Image (cartoon, rainbow, N blue to C red):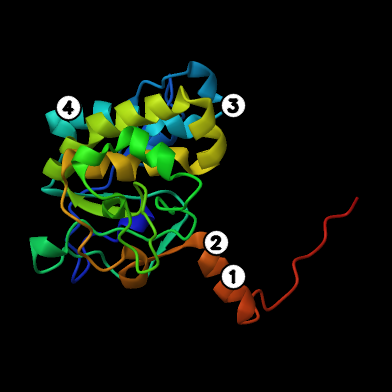
Amino acid sequence: RQMCIRDRPGSDLVAFTRVLHRSKDDGLEVEVPTVRVKPLDPACDVQCGFVVKDRPYAMRQFLDEPSNVLASHIFLAETDYVFLRPLALPASEAELPMGFPFGYILPNWPTITHIMRRHFPEEHGDLKRLSWGSHGEGSGPAPVLISAADLKLITPEWERITAAIEADADAKKKLGWVREMYAYDLAAAVAGVPEWYGRDVDGSYVRLRSAFVRLLRASGWPRTRRPTRAR
């Protein structure tokens, strides 16, 4: 709830919603506005092999209910982001979508281009459409600032491609734990969503918590040692 930075000068955020992929409520819905969606595998309530495969299915359920979409644009976020300033829409739609170029999402890496081509056939264009970062990086679905209309176009393909990768042993092995992130970038290109024109979200608005903690530690944080627990 705190991360949304609402009602501050310069903020365009009008609502904050947690999407919960569980078969039952977890108690936090009384504190945080929550939409609960059905998981693909109820075992993921506790532990399962790859819970992230639920994400596109969860977002489709969220978007299928019109009352869930409270604004023209959606910011997809995970729980380990630290906001630097209130989130505002860019002056022009030409700057959207905005995403973060992850250095480990490399759609044109030689050992995986054959996998990219399975899901992005040549008739869709050059594989470079999957890479928008200055070093050929892709994004994945978070952090992403995107119009609700574009997200609705992407999500069916995102769900389909994620399922196809899950059924492909070679793709699962080579793409590893970020395979659903690759599926999002593939889906965006297949759906014809415009290229990533915008500034990266991380540099403008938010830091991933892991990077933020490294920065604090480099500056000498914490200043005092934590007390040790008696054994």
Query: In the structure shown, which secondary structural element does the residue marked by tag 4 occupy?
Result: loop
Q: Identify which amino acid the numbered label 3 is placed on.
A: Gln
Residue with the mark numbered 2? 210
Q: Position of residue 208 (x, y in %)?
A: 46, 61
Please, what is the three-letter code of the amino acid marked with disc 1?
A: Arg
Gap in Å between the C-alphas at discs 1 and 3? Answer: 29 Å
Dot 1: within a 10 Å radius of its alpha carbon, few (fewer than 14), some, or many (20 or more) residues? few
- Mark 4 vs mark 2, CA separation in Å: 34 Å
Cβ atoms under marks 1 and 2 closer than 8 Å:
yes
Q: Amino acid at mark 2?
A: Ser
Task: Give the amino acid at mark 4.
Answer: Glu
Q: First in sequence: mark 2 or mark 3? A: 3
Crowd tier of the residue under label 4, counting other residues whose Cα lies within 10 Å: few below 14, some 14–19, many 20 or above: few
| Residue at image mark 3 | 47
Q: Earlier in the sequence, mark 4 or mark 1?
A: 4
Local SS, label 3? loop
Report if the CB atoms under discs 4 and 1 are less than 8 Å apart.
Answer: no
Using the numbered discs, state the Cα–Cα distance from disc 2 to disc 3 in whole angstroms.
Answer: 23 Å
The residue nearer to you, when weighing 12 against 168, is 168
Location of mark 4 (residue)? 65
